[in-house]
């Protein structure tokens, strides 16, 4: 009875983790203007962390790894309900696999000085399932060193590794040639357009991704005081309240400004670089 209760608890937690990871995956790819309902400013924001440079590993969204981890946890726990005893050990080991990923994302939140509420929910679930799976593992008295058990686990984990490698390969396949925005980026600078940004700004990160390598030609002013290259005083002087903010200046005089995300076409119209 105790075994089934623990397994059902793990399954329920796995479902919550899966649904949360799916939302974070959707948020990762959402248009920059949408944000997330768990955004409460720079210190507490799903979008900021989930669109930062730390939101992908090997070009794969961390949220996708989380969703797949949750699915596998649910599958193994469901099978274990049917007396597949070797899976009790598998569940415990699979939970241990998640610990480094939790550590990575907590470190990313520390670097960004931002908490992602839904990411934290998944982290708490992982810690709870680690404890539950350990209790289950100890109560079942199964030994990882058992040869028969080891063979079954090897085959299971080899399959999982193949699935993960296939996903990594899929996300790293050569893509079609991206449009080159060098001319537009150079024109923006020539027209006196600057992007006032923040290293903690998810929309800024997506804007850089949109330009690709061409972004090096754009004049960027870092406004966040925690950045080692910040120009906070200048941003204060310019009255920057939100990032990104695009400002066009000519002969030291501000011509126009626009806060928030702008598409390529909107930037062409804004700057007259059409």
Image (spheres, rainbow, N blue to C red):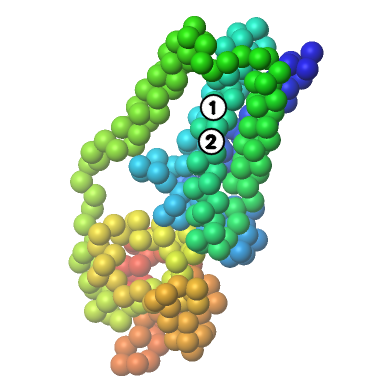
- Secondary structure category for the residue under label 2: helix
- How packed mark 1 is, by other alpha carbons closer than 10 Å (few <14, some 14-19, many 20 or more), is many
Q: Position of residue 245 (x, y in %)?
A: 45, 73
Marker count (numbered):
2
| Tag shown at residue 94 | 1
- Residue in the foreground of this view, choosing between 124 and 144: 144
Determine which residue is flagged by label 2. Answer: 98
Is residue 55 shown left or right of residue 95? left
Q: Nearer the viewer, residue 173 or 141?
A: 141
Q: Are marks 2 and 1 in contact (CB under 8 Å)?
A: yes
Report the side of 154 relative to 24 (left or right): left
Give the quadrant of residue 84. top right
Report the residue at 45% width, 20% height from top: 157
Up the image or down, 256 lies above or below 267; here it is: below
Q: Tell me what residue is drawn at x 49 percent, y 64 percent.
A: 200
Q: Which of 260/73 is in front? A: 73
Q: What is the quadrant of the N terminus in the image?
A: top right
Camera sees residue 235: no
Seen from this angle, which residue lies furthest right? 1
Q: How far separated are the C-alphas under marks 2 and 1?
A: 7 Å
Residue at 35 percent across and 92 percent down: it is 252
**Picture layout, residue 151 above or below residue 98:** above
Residue 2: percent from the left, percent from the top? Answer: 78, 17
In the rendering, at what x and y percent does residue 69 appear? 52, 30
x and y, in percent, of residue 170 in the image = 32, 32
Residue visible at 46% across and 70% down?
A: 198
């Amino acid at each position: 009875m105790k075994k089934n209760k623990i397994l059902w608890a793990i399954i329920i937690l796995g479902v919550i983790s899966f649904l949360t990871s799916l939302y974070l995956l959707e948020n990762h790819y959402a248009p920059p203007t949408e944000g997330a309902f768990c955004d409460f400013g720079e210190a507490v924001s799903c979008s900021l962390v989930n669109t930062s440079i730390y939101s992908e590993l090997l070009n794969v969204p961390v949220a996708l790894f989380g969703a797949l981890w949750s699915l596998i946890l649910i599958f193994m726990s469901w099978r274990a309900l049917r007396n597949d005893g070797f899976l009790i050990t598998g569940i415990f080991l699979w939970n241990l696999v998640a610990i480094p990923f939790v550590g990575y994302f907590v470190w990313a939140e520390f670097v960004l000085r931002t908490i992602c509420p839904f990411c934290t929910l998944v982290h708490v679930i992982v810690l709870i399932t680690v404890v539950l799976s350990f209790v289950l593992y100890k109560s079942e008295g199964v030994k990882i060193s058992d040869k028969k058990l080891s063979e079954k686990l090897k085959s299971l984990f080899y399959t999982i590794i193949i699935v993960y490698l296939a996903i990594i390969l899929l996300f790293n396949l050569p893509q079609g040639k991206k449009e080159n925005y060098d001319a537009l980026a150079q024109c923006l600078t020539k027209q006196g357009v600057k992007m006032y940004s923040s290293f903690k700004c998810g929309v800024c990160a997506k804007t850089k991704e949109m330009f690709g390598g061409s972004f090096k030609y754009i004049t960027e002013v870092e406004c966040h005081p925690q950045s080692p290259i910040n120009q906070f005083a200048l941003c204060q002087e310019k009255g920057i309240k939100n990032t990104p903010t695009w400002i066009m200046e000519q002969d030291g005089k501000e011509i126009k400004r626009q806060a928030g995300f702008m598409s390529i076409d909107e930037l062409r119209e804004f700057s007259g670089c059409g």
